[in-house]
Image (spheres, rainbow, N blue to C red):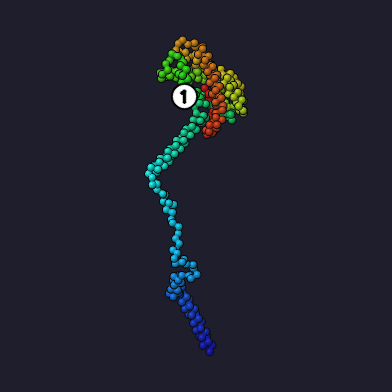
Amino acid sequence: MARGGLNRHRLVHVVVISFALLVNIASGLESQNPPQQDTAQQEKSSQTPDKNQTQPPPDQAPAQGPPSDKSSNHPQENPNPAQAAAEKTKEVTARAAQATKDIARRGLVHLRSWEENWVTGVFVEEDQPLVPLTSQERQKIYLRETLVTPGAYLKRMFAAGIDQARGVPSQWDDGWGGYAERFASREGQFVTANSLAALANAKLGYEVRYDLCRCHGLWPRTRHAIVRNFLTYDRTEQQRRPQWGLYAGAFGGGLISTAWKPHPRNAFAEGGRAVLGQAGYGTLLNFFIEFAGEINRKLGARNKDLSQPAQHP
């Protein structure tokens, strides 16, 4: 009896498990293959219009969407070829004018950058200490200010142009030949004066560079520019001494220039005129160097840190 009860219990257990497996298999088949009837009903319901939906009256045409703006996708072509050519020419002209303006502005900025220019020469910034020059530094400054930079020749070309306009010396003609003689005379006198001044300053140990004023204000800086054309520093770079070497060189250059200028010439008179020229030209150049930074900012040139000291002639 006990054995039969155990067998019936096992049989019920097997039947339950088998029924559960069949239910799982059937549900899997239904998920893979949905009934065709439900699909047909769904298609029918999708095709049947909703009675609650508002339909347009029979005599009214269905509303159409706004016409597509073809001009938004495709640019409207100009039907007038002459007008199209005029607009194209105007556009090209505007671009060329802008490019020319940019090139001119960049060129003007370069011309205004006096620190890089050959006009001011070598000078000492106000925040740089004055250190005595070595023989090699003096030689480098001499060559730069006298022979190897285009600025030295451009200044003489300008001076020769003034002499040409004034007609001095009167013995030289007014053509290109006369201008060449005047330029050669100016260049020879300049090289002679600078060479004599460099030798004298090296012998005396005098400072040959212009130093920017460590003061503020128009008048103090102007006074410094004027005074420094007549006084310079000795070997200590603190004590000021008269510019003996500079003006001795100017006098010697004017005196020697009588060797090639038309006669009759008074050598001492030429030397005196050269000294007066150095007084006026040197003061003007010092003033220009002193206020070069303000001139640059006024004219819109770029600012640049100057680390190289430089001399005026």
Q: Nearer the viewer, residue 78 or 116?
A: 78
Q: Position of residue 149 (x, y in %)?
A: 47, 26
Residue in view at x 41 percent, y 18 percent: 175
Tell me the quarter of the picture where residue 88 sits. Answer: top left
**Circle 1 — which element?**
helix
Residue in view at x 49 percent, y 67 percent: 54
Q: Residue furthest left?
A: 81
The 10 Å Cα crowd at callout 1, few under 14, some 14 to 19, many 20 or more, is few
Q: Nearer the viewer, residue 149 or 80?
A: 80
Q: Nearer the viewer, residue 274 or 246?
A: 274
Question: Is 251 situated above or below 126?
Answer: above
Q: Amino acid at mark 1?
A: Leu
Q: Is residue 234 left or right of residue 30?
A: right
Numbered label tally: 1
Q: Position of residue 193 (x, y in %)?
A: 50, 18
Can residue 11 be seen here? The reply is yes
Can residue 156 be seen here? The reply is no
Q: Nearer the viewer, residue 88 or 208?
A: 88
Q: Position of residue 57 (x, y in %)?
A: 46, 66
Residue in view at x 48 percent, y 80 percent: 18
Residue in view at x 45 percent, y 59 percent: 65
Q: Residue furthest front?
A: 59
Q: Position of residue 279 (x, y in %)?
A: 55, 19
Give the residue at mark 1: 154
